[in-house]
Image: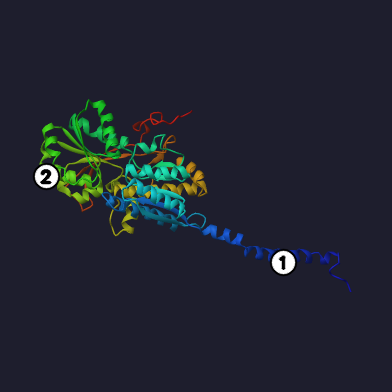
Amino acid sequence: MTDRSTDTSPSSAPALPRRRLLQMGAAGAALASTPFALHLSRAQGVPIKIGFPVPLTGAFSAEAQDQVRAAELAVKEFNDAGGFKGRKVELLVRDDKLNPGEAATRTLELIEKDKVDFIVGSLSAATQLSINAVTRQRKIIFNSISQSDAINEARDWSLYTFHEALNPHLTAGAVARYAFPKFGKKVVYLTADYAYGSEMVRGFQRAGQAFGVQTLADIRHPLGAADYSAFLPRIQALKPDILVLANFGRDLVNSAKQATDFGLKSTTKIITPVLLYTSRLAGGPEAFEGILGGTSYYWGMEDKIPAAKTFNDKFRKAYSGTVPSDYGALGYAGVRSVLQAVLNADSADNTRVAIALRQLKYNWYKGEQSYRKCDHQSVQSVVIVESKSKNMKDKFDVFNVLSIEAPDEKNLRTCDEMGHKVTT
């Protein structure tokens, strides 16, 4: 008999590879049961976590809740499309209570305890700087969805700092360029006494120089003020052509109501840098009648901008026919931009995603946008709207769109002014 174990004839050649294949298969099965293989298998399914600190309580709670709704919509879209290499996204919402210390604490917990991959959020100029201080030190991307001039300045900036929202220089400048030539040169500011208010006033005053605008007074009030009656007689006595309400959220609602009740509109045009959709709904048509301001987004743009119609329809479907607010849209764009950068980078690594994000050109809901290379400010349009109380199609139809200032880097402060050294 021939011993097949030592047979070298051609007829026995296939037996050796088959044995090796069986051995390799057994080895592979053993490897698949090792902790290392289990780790690799689990890593593919580990969710991508986005921390989302916003002021769910406090004066800006209505705006924050809409940010959350729209951010959840962006996450759902991404997950429904398959996620990233089998990884779905989780949104971890935290209440920063409109407090810088609380915002920093919640952000630190999100990073160190919850192990989030990225941070998106904020609704206050003060809290976003404290959030950014935490994320910048740990090289975690933070895409801010609140207005601020300071966050893009070199002293607060990093490769991982992005600013999806408008900034006060851009917003106030657009409103000033529209309003000052039409309504007069004598201006009084009623200003919330924190970074947002100060930066908005600076934006108005800088833009107003081209029109010879005169500041009669800059009257400061504390954040969260309920009573403005002490300020109104002084404002009336100054006889301004324009009163600028440089405040936000509940402060804007209260000051608009009380200025209207006091009768200031009979002699003075009231404008505000950010005319909030949520504030207009809360304050009602009479209080806001004729007040003009800027916004990053108004749902009524859908008649002229296809991306707005698409976004609005998704939001309506998800939330029982309601429409998104301006700050809600920022929550959507802030999250969606980061997730698109993950896809473009083919990675969830923060450095690679940051590089992809700064190269992103996108149109999620309002027209073309992109991040300026030197400071990661989103270059975008500013919408000028005026509140109305007549000829409203439904309860959501609260503004007339007067003008849309197109995206233009020339409307931003220069990179050099902000401390960024740009080389060509």
* Visible residue check, residue 164: no
Q: Judge from the rendering whether residue 52 lies leftward or rightward of residue 44; answer left or right.
A: left
Q: Secondary structure at mark 1?
A: helix
Q: Nearer the viewer, residue 95 or 62?
A: 95
Image quadrant in which the N terminus is located? bottom right
The residue that label 2 is drawn on is 261
Q: Which mark is residue 22?
A: 1
Q: Which mark is residue 106?
A: none
Residue at 17% from the left image edge and 48% from the top image edge: 285
Q: Residues within 10 Å of mark 2 (few under 14, many from 20)?
A: few
Q: Judge from the rendering whether residue 224 lies leftward or rightward of residue 73; answer left or right.
A: left
**Which image quadrant is residue 209 in?**
top left
- Amino acid tagged 1: Leu
Can you say whether 168 is above or below 283 in the image?
A: above
Q: Nearer the viewer, residue 215 or 368?
A: 215
Spot occupied by residue 234 in the image (x, y as percentages of width and height) = 13, 35
Image marks 1 and 2: residues in contact by CB distance under 8 Å: no
- Amino acid tagged 2: Asp
Q: Secondary structure at mark 2?
A: helix
Residue at 42% from the left image edge and 52% from the top image edge: 109
- In front of the other: label 1 or label 2? 2
Can you say whether 392 is above or below 194 in the image?
A: below
**First in sequence: mark 1 vs mark 2:** 1
Q: Judge from the rendering whether residue 338 lies leftward or rightward of residue 225; answer left or right.
A: right
Spot occupied by residue 308 in the image (x, y as percentages of width and height) = 33, 48
Distance, label 1 to label 2, CA atoms, is 87 Å
Outermost residue to the right = 1
